Amino acid sequence: MTLTNWAGNIAFDAARVHRPSTVDRVREVVAGAERVRVLGSGHSFNDIADTPADLISVAGLPVEPRIDAAAGTVTVAGGVRYGQLAAFLDAQGYALHNLGSLPHISIAGAIATGTHGSGAALGNLATAVAGIELVTAGGDLVRLARGDADFPGAVVSLGTLGVVVGVTLDVRPAYTIRQFVFEHLPRSVLDARWEDIATAGYSVSLFTGWAGDTVDQLWLKLADGEEPDGFGAVPAGRAMHPIAAMPPESCTDQGGVPGPWHRRLPHFKLEFTPSSGEELQTEYFVARDDAVEAFAAIERLRHLVTPVLQISEIRVVAADELWLSPTYRRDSVALHFTWIQDAARVAPVVAALEEALAPLAARPHWGKVFHRAARPERLTDFLALRDRLDPDRKFSNAFVERHLAAE
Ligand SMILES: Cc1cc2nc3c(=O)[nH]c(=O)nc-3n(C[C@H](O)[C@H](O)[C@H](O)COP(=O)(O)OP(=O)(O)OC[C@H]3O[C@@H](n4cnc5c(N)ncnc54)[C@H](O)[C@@H]3O)c2cc1C
């Protein structure tokens, strides 16, 4: 059976797929391979994880979560999914600072692309990484920790430095979140009150089809002590799915019912395993201060965007220091598009969006559909690190050659 990504739009080309159950076996496979790539949970929408040679999944490595209470960290196998780790942490009275919209995504795969949730004060998921353990090209086990010179280059790595077999993440005491959904936020209010809306709670998301004079939904995920403000939008009188016409059963509880962090921060419940999604996704990051300009640029393309769009999500992410991160040194607004699954119709719209957002120095999400990435500011440093750890480019692939070329 052909191995595909979650959305089914990428059929992996790999000659061999390895599913080692020990780190020693990972080391043997890597040492013996000429070209190798790592597959996480396959949730990316482009060929970032693909290779015509050897593909390794580390999903079968022992999970072995270990909490270090004194350091405030947990160490776990890289292939573990966030939902699985979150349940373990919560049971021990601990939490992560944030989660993405879906709990089914692997930790190593998420941090490799700079996957994020929302929250003006919250960095992307890779910013919680305090250490990584990776099998490098020669089969060596290398450990890098926050504070090491190479560390900021090694976390958002696009899978090009080695196989991440272990990750150490910062943890904090478990906390409660209340989730509120509002409908029909006046579009003019989004511009006029953008900064207030972006900072209206622990985590804020907006869903829009860019079509009318309202924003479809405002989701507030509030920590203790925060009170909901809908900015003139109408409190949803019922449970909502981000696409209002879809049934809300798969969504995490709303209506302000307090719940543990890991059952409110993702939009979707862990127990509703999504099979393959009839969708494609694209996302661009611009400076949070340029959000209103970006909204206008998107709306100027409304005639192109709306016919192929299922829904857009607007989130905010705090700046970080990770070299290839799309939010490197820039407090950002993340402009997300869930498209219909029609690559041929979506491609020209993505090209038009990219052109429209280029004056705002937009950066793409590495794991979603895009054409060209602007040259990352720290690319030279990253390539020097890559050339040291992987001089023969064993971990490279067509995606990496396309988007991380020196010139
Ligand atoms: C329904 C859905 C919802 C999503 N929601 C969000 C969201 O809320 N926020 C967001 O930012 N993104 C989101 N994404 C995108 C997703 O988080 C990213 O594409 C992420 O990188 C996928 O992780 P993965 O484990 O599936 O990695 P894969 O897609 O399998 O791989 C991605 C990259 O990680 C590398 N990699 C994977 N495992 C390892 C490892 N062990 N060692 C070294 N490299 C490795 C791969 O080589 C590849 O380069 C969503 C995607 C889907 C399908």
Image (cartoon, grey):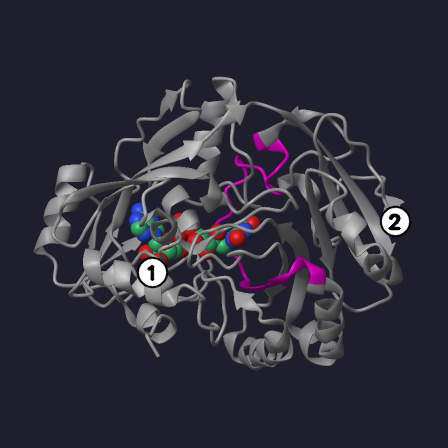
- The residue that label 1 is drawn on is 49
The amino acid pointed to by label 2 is Ala
Residue 251: in sight, yes or no?
Answer: yes
The residue positioned 60% from the left and 78% from the top of the image is 349
The residue positioned 68% from the left and 61% from the top of the image is 311
Snapshot quadrant of residue 260: top right
- The residue that label 2 is drawn on is 233
| Label 2 Cα neighbours within 10 Å, binned few <14 / some 14-19 / many ≥20 | many
Magenta stretch holds residue 325? no
Residue 50: in sight, yes or no?
Answer: no
| Label 1 Cα neighbours within 10 Å, binned few <14 / some 14-19 / many ≥20 | many
Residue 345 or 305: which is nearer the viewer? 305
SS under mark 1: helix
Q: How many marks?
A: 2
Q: Which residues are magenta?
A: 262-289
The amino acid pointed to by label 1 is Ala
Image position of 145 (left or right of 198): left
On the image, the x and y values in percent for residue 8 come to 43, 62
Image position of 70 (left or right of 257): left
Q: Which part of the image, by quadrant, shows the N terminus?
A: bottom left
Q: Earlier in the sequence, mark 1 or mark 2?
A: 1
Q: Is mark 1 within 8 Å of ligand 1?
A: yes
Snapshot quadrant of residue 251: top right
The residue positioned 39% from the left and 27% from the top of the image is 74
Instruction: State the mark number for residue 195.
Output: none
- Residue pushed farthest right? 232
